[in-house]
Image (spheres, helix red, strand yellow):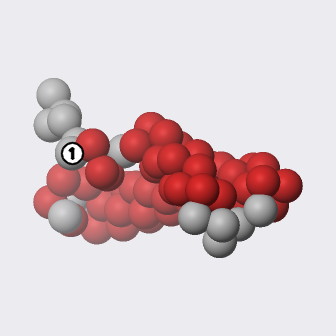
Amino acid sequence: MNPVKPGIASTEFWMAMIPQVLTVLVLLGVVSVGDAAMLGDAAGKLVASVVALIASATVIITYIRGRVAVKTAQSPDDLR
C-alpha cells in the first residue's frame, strides 16, 4: 500500500490554494478582479500540465527500466 502524501504534495492542495491566493491578491489590490479570473484559469491549466508531465515521465522511466531489465535479464526492481 502506498503511504499517504503530505497535503502540500497533493494536486488537490494546489488546486484549492490557487483561488485563495488570487483572492488575497485581489483584496490587496495587486490584481484586478478581471485579471484574477484569467490568472486562475491559467494557473489551473499549469497545475494540470505539470501533473500530466510528471505522469508521462513516470511511464517513460518505468518503460526504460523494464526494457533494460529484459535486455540484461534482471528484475526491474533490481534497477532502482
Q: Which of the 4 image quadrants contains residue 69?
A: bottom left
Evaluate whether residue 77 shows in this view.
Answer: yes
Q: Residue at x 31, y 51 (%)?
A: 9
Looking at this view, name the residue that lies furthest to the right.
Answer: 34
Q: Residue at x 15, y 37 (%)?
A: 3
Return the residue nearer the eye: 60 or 40.
40
On screen, residue 12 versus residue 27, left or right, reads left
Return the residue nearer the eye: 18 or 5.
18
Evaluate whether residue 56 shows in this view.
Answer: no
Reading the image, the residue beneath label 1 is: 6
Amino acid at the residue labelled 1: Pro
Q: Position of residue 66 (x, y in %)?
A: 37, 55
On screen, residue 49 versus residue 72, left or right, reads right
Q: Residue at x 30, y 51 (%)?
A: 8
Eyeballing the image, is 48 above or below 74? above
Q: Position of residue 23 (x, y in %)?
A: 59, 50
Looking at this view, name the residue that lies furthest to the front.
Answer: 28
Q: Residue at x 69, y 52 (%)?
A: 40
Location of the N terminus (image quadrant):
top left
Eyeballing the image, is 54 above or below 23? below
Return the residue nearer the eye: 43 or 50.
43
Location of the C terminus (image quadrant):
bottom left
Return the residue nearer the eye: 60 or 75.
60
Q: Which of the 4 image quadrants contains residue 38?
A: bottom right
Q: Which of the 4 image quadrants contains residue 31?
A: bottom right
Q: Position of residue 47 (x, y in %)?
A: 58, 54
* Helix, strand or loop at mark 1: loop
